Image (cartoon, helix red, strand yellow):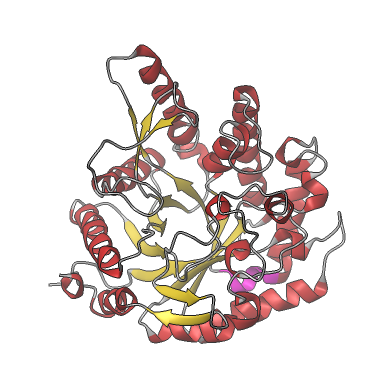
Amino acid sequence: MADFPSGFRFGSSTAAHQVEGGNSNNDWWAWEHRGRTTGMEPSGDAIDHYHRYEEDFALLASLGQDAHRLSLEWSRIEPEPGEFSAAAIGHYRRVLGSLAEHGLTAYVTLHHFTLPRWLSERGGWLAPDAVERFERYCERVAADLGDLMPFTCTVNEPQIVALFGYLEGLHPPGERNPHLWRLVTGRLREAHGAALRAFAGASSLGICLQLPALEPARPDDPGCVALADELRTEMWDAWLDPGIGGDWVGVQYYTRMRVDPAATTCFAPPPAGVPLTLMGWELHPEGLYEAIAGAASRTGLPVHITENGIAAADDGERIAYLRTHLEQVARALRDGIDVRAYLYWSSFDNFEWAEGYRPTFGLIGIDREDGLRREVRPSAGAFGEVARTHSLRPLV
C-alpha cells in the first residue's frame, strides 16, 4: 500500500545565491566581503550551478525526483533601478525550460533572502518604495518567465528575513531593533500581496513560511513565555490566516526553538544530550506534523513542503532524518490533510548563508577540492526510490 497518493511530488530545493556563484551585485555578497559570515568565507563560485544547471537537473531527474524548487536572482534581472537585463532573463528562460525538459515541475521563488545592492543601499525593505520596486520586478518576471513557472513562491521565509536581519542581526542589514523587526514584517506582507497582484492568473501562487516549533526555554518564567508568544505572533499568526491569499502555502520546517530573552540571539541552546544536526539544531520530527496541520487549518490552503532537511556529516543520519520526517508527512495525509509535495533541502551542499560552506545539507555532495565535482550520496538514491514507489519502505 502506498504511503503517498498518486500525483504527490517529490523533489529538492536550491536558492540562487547559494548555488549559482558570482552574484556580486546583491547585499549578501557585500555582507560576506565584510567578513560577516561565521565561516569567514564568501560565496564565491558557490557550486557554479549558473553554468552547470543542465547537468544538475539531469542528475536530479535520474535519481527519481519529479519537482525542483529554485529562486531567481533579482540583482541579475534588475542590476540597476528600472534597468532589466535581457541576458539574465534569457538565462532563466533556459533554466526553466531545462527543468521542464527533464520532467521536473518548477517551484520558482521570487525573493530568497537577497536584495539588489541598489535597493539595500537605499534601506532595503525599509526604503519607502521597496514594495513598489518589488512589484515592478515581479511584473517583469511574470511577463517574461511566467509561462514557465507552474508554481511560484512570492517570498521565502519572510519571518526569517525580518528576525535575522532586524532583531538578531545575523543577516543583512544586521539590525537589532524590535521596532524595525515588526515594521519589516508588515512590509514583507505587503510585498507578498504585490507579487500576488503582479502574477494574477500567470501561475499557481504561494508563500514559503518557516514554521519552527516555538517553546519558552523556561515555562515558569514570564519573560520567556511573553517572548515566545510574541515570536509566535510574528512568525505564525502574522502569516497563517485565510487573508494571506494565494493558491497554496509552503511549509518549511527544521527544528524546535527554545525562546529565551536572556540569550544573545533570543534562543537558548537545545537541552543537553539531545541529538543535534551540524547546525546545532535539535531533531524534533513531530514539529513538522504540527507545522503542516497548523498551516492547513489556519489558511485553508493546500500544503506543499518546500524545505525540510538536515546538515549531517554522516549520510546515514540523513536517511534516518528523511524516514522520521516523511513519516510525519504520511501521518498528515492519513489524517486527511491536503499535502501535495515534499521538497528536501537541499539538492546539493551549498553556501549556507552566515554558516558558509561548513554545513552539508545536500543529497548530493560537492567536492570543493576537485573542481566542484558532484558526489551522489546514498540518501539521494533512497529518496529517489521513495519518489518512484510512493512508499517509505526504501528508507527502512
- Point out residue 320 in the picture as x, y percentages from the top left corner: 23, 63
The reply, left or right, for residue 283 in relation to residue 298 is: left
Rendered residue at 42%/81% (across/down): 375
The answer to which image quadrant residue 44 occupies is bottom right
The answer to which image quadrant residue 261 occupies is top left
Towards the viewer: 311 or 129: 311
- Point out residue 191 in the picture as x, y percentages from the top left corner: 66, 44
Rendered residue at 36%/70% (across/down): 10
Identify the residue at the far top of this view.
222
Above or below — where is 269 with respect to 307?
Answer: above
Q: From the image, which quarter does the C terminus lie in?
A: bottom left
Towards the viewer: 239 or 288: 288
- Point out residue 345 in the picture as x, y percentages from the top left corner: 42, 62
> Would residue 146 be counted in the magenta stretch?
yes
The reply, left or right, for residue 206 in relation to residue 113 is: left
- Point out residue 183 in the picture as x, y percentages from the top left corner: 64, 28
The residue segment tinted magenta is 145-149
> Would residue 197 be counted in the magenta stretch?
no
Above or below — where is 163 with respect to 276?
Answer: above
